[in-house]
Amino acid sequence: MKTWILAVVLCVSTGVFAQPGRGEHHGERQKLTAEQRTELQVKKMTLELDLTDKQKADIQKLVLDRNKKAETEMAKHKADREAGKVPTKDERFAMQSKKLDEQIAMKAEMKKVLNDEQFEKWQKMHEKRKDNFKDRRKNLKKEKRR
């Protein structure tokens, strides 16, 4: 009798801990399109920076272009990863260099569109987002090691 009770308790407790993980709870998480992400980003920026209509339109174009480029790059990298292709040192250097060039260009364009006060605020927002991303990556790496 004790072994049956123990077996039932083990089965129930195992079932409780075997719940679906993040992203699996309600099926596969659907990604937003580049246009949807752009619209949300511009709305957040409008709230934070008090953008004019002209500024919103200019930023919308910049962010949409950046999001579409990022989407195609991610798809390319995913296909390479699935094919088992590992980038060489030179390819990694070229990718990082290209990414930095795009960030410099984006910063210059934002400086043209925003006034000085808005640009300073945008830079602070951008830095805060980068820091949050770095913290999330550190936490993910710690969790994987466990």
Image: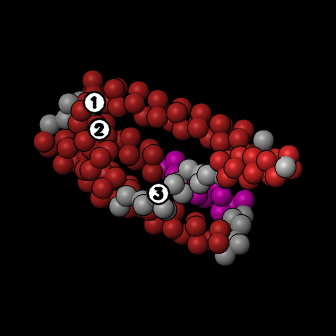
User: Is 4 placed above or below 44 here?
Assistant: below
Q: Residue at x 79, y 47 (%)?
A: 5
Residue 125 locus on image (x, y percent): 40, 30
Q: Residue furthest top?
A: 117
Magenta residues, start to end = 89-101
Q: Quadrant of the C terminus?
A: top right
**Residue 81 lies in quadrant:** bottom right
Tell me the SS state at disc 2: helix
Q: Amino acid at mark 1?
A: Glu
Q: Is residue 9 left or right of residue 31?
A: right
Residue at label 3? 26
Residue at label 1? 48
Can residue 101 be seen here? The reply is yes
Considering the whole magenta stretch, tell me its main secondary structure: helix
The Cα atoms of the two marked residues, 3 and 1, are separated by: 32 Å
Q: Is residue 89 left or right of residue 127?
A: right
The Cα atoms of the two marked residues, 2 and 1, are separated by: 6 Å
Which one is in front, 145 or 45? 145
Dot in front, 3 or 1: 3
The answer to whether residue 144 is magenta is no
The Cα atoms of the two marked residues, 3 and 2, are separated by: 27 Å
Tell me the SS state at disc 3: loop
Mark 3 neighbour class, 10 Å CA radius: few under 14, some 14 to 19, many 20 or more: few
Residue at label 2? 44
Q: Residue at x 40, y 47 (%)?
A: 105
